[in-house]
Amino acid sequence: MTVHGHTGVPETDLVLAVARALRRSAGDGLAALDLTPHEARALRAVAGHGHGGGRGPGRHAPDGELQPAPDAEAQSAPDGAPSPAPRLADIAAALRIAPRSATEVIDRLQDRGLVQRRPSATDRRAVEVVPTPEGRAVLVEVERVWRTSAEAFLAPLDRDERTTLADLLRRLLPEDPRP
């Protein structure tokens, strides 16, 4: 059987190949924003920290419209209390990378003026990372790039096939799926 030019590829290799192709597709759009996919994911992690799941920063509303990431100070925990901005360790955990790697990517985003470090309001020894207004604006564009890339990539599938694909992929995810 031939699938997209591959013969006899195991299912896991096929899933990885699809993920790489989608990442390459989005990577072209992100390059126009002078971001790598890794930097874009880090920016999402900074802006989306503490949203408590559901339709958070940079996600789509029920009507399909993209919602920009809110200011980090405006985020709240599920109990309604203000949610602290993420620390580098939180970002590293969200991205599943080493803290040193998180530091490097946050340094690059800070050099571009997309994030800033600030002292924690709750722990004076800690430093939090928050998106700047420019970072939030870029994040809206990042989400547009990813949405457009995904739509183009999934165009060969009809609505029912997309639903089936999403259902199957969700079944394969662990309890704590992260971006």
Image (cartoon, grey):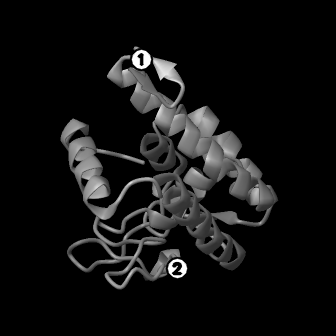
**What whole-number distance in Å separates the C-alpha atoms at marks 2 and 1?**
39 Å
* Circle 2 crowding by C-alpha within 10 Å: few under 14, some 14–19, many from 20: some
Q: Quadrant of the N terminus?
A: top left
Task: Please say if 150 is above or below 9.
Answer: below
Task: Please say if 75 is above or below 130.
Answer: below
Q: Which mark is residue 158?
A: none
User: From this viewpoint, is residue 176 visible?
Assistant: yes
- Residue drawn at x 76%, y 50% is 108
* Residue at mark 2: 68
* Residue at mark 1: 9
- Look at the numbered discs 2 and 1 and tell me whether their residues touch, using CB distance below 8 Å: no
Foreground: 15 or 44? 15
The disc labelled 1 sits on which kind of residue?
A: Val
Counting labels gives 2
In the rendered image, residue 145, in percent from the top left (x then y), is placed at 62, 64
Q: Secondary structure at mark 2?
A: loop
Within the image, what quadrant is residue 60 found in? bottom left
In the rendered image, residue 167, in percent from the top left (x then y), is placed at 21, 50
Q: Secondary structure at mark 1?
A: loop
The disc labelled 2 sits on which kind of residue?
A: Pro
Q: Earlier in the sequence, mark 2 or mark 1?
A: 1
Foreground: 20 or 125? 20
